[in-house]
């Protein structure tokens, strides 16, 4: 059973992309997604190389948002594809079976499609409103996750589902009880007074949540 915290990089007035990744890793996070949505590949490449090295030193999984060809070039662990990015089936054709591919979902139809197209995990949300994501899909809340998880079980869809979108430490126990496999965070960590300690606290909450 997965019990995973994913950290999604975000640039703030206080922290660069790499600053945030270092803090998350120091706090014990073992899954990093580099997300630089409006940058070019040439801007992303040097940051991705350094982030990948940091993840390797920490024993963490490193995925890059959207950029399938850059993932292949750098031999990152995988790619996360949003609803407007390359189709998962096409990414799988390019990357083969050795790379992790995640897909963004908001409905059971999204989950079903990603599962059949060969995704390894689903990032499902948003849980609530978040300022770190443009073109936000409809809010799911706890009921939305319960409904999606129930449908997945009824249909025999066995794939990790990671909750995302405006989640705080206080939300985690209730969210984990819906049956999701993990939590993805960004702003909650970067806005904390002590980001490293907040990551440690959230990681502990996730690990101790009931199965």
Image (cartoon, helix red, strand yellow):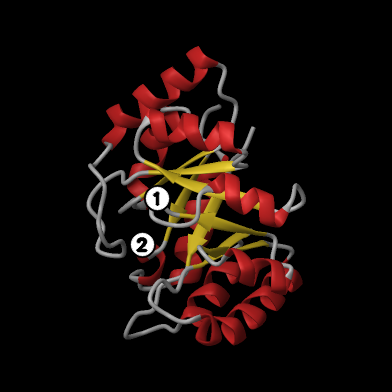
Q: Nearer the viewer, residue 111 or 187?
A: 111
- Residue 128 spot, x, y in % from top left: 25, 47
Which is more foreground, mark 1 or mark 2?
Answer: 1
* Residue 166 circle label: none
- Residue 183 spot, x, y in % from top left: 47, 47
Quadrant housing the N terminus: top right
Residue furthest to the top? 154
Q: Earlier in the sequence, mark 1 or mark 2?
A: 1
Residue 47 figure quarter? bottom right
Quadrant housing the C terminus: top right
* Residue 188 circle label: 2
Q: What element carries label 2?
A: helix
Q: In this view, does 82 lie above or below 41?
A: above
Please give the residue where the numbered disc 1 appears in the rendered image: 83
Q: What element carries label 1?
A: loop
- Residue 53 is left or right of residue 180, and the answer is right
């Amino acid at each position: 059973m997965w019990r995973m915290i994913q950290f999604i990089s975000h640039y703030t007035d206080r922290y660069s992309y790499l600053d945030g990744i270092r803090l998350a890793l120091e706090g014990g996070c073992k899954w990093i997604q580099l997300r630089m949505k409006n940058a070019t590949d040439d801007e992303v490449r040097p940051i991705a190389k350094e982030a990948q090295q940091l993840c390797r030193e920490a024993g963490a999984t490193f995925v890059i948002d959207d950029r399938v060809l850059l993932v292949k070039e750098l031999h990152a662990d995988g790619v996360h594809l949003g609803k407007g990015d390359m189709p998962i089936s096409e990414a799988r054709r390019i990357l083969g079976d050795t790379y992790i591919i995640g897909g963004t979902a908001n409905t059971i139809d999204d989950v079903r499609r990603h599962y059949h197209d060969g995704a390894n995990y689903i990032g499902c949300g948003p849980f609530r409103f978040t300022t770190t994501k443009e073109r936000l899909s409809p809010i799911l809340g706890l009921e939305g996750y319960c409904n999606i998880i129930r449908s997945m079980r009824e249909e025999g869809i066995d794939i990790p589902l990671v909750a995302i979108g405006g989640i705080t430490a206080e939300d985690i126990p209730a969210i984990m009880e819906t049956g999701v496999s993990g939590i993805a965070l960004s702003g909650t960590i970067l806005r904390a007074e002590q980001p490293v300690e907040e990551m440690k606290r959230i990681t502990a909450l996730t690990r101790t949540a009931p199965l």
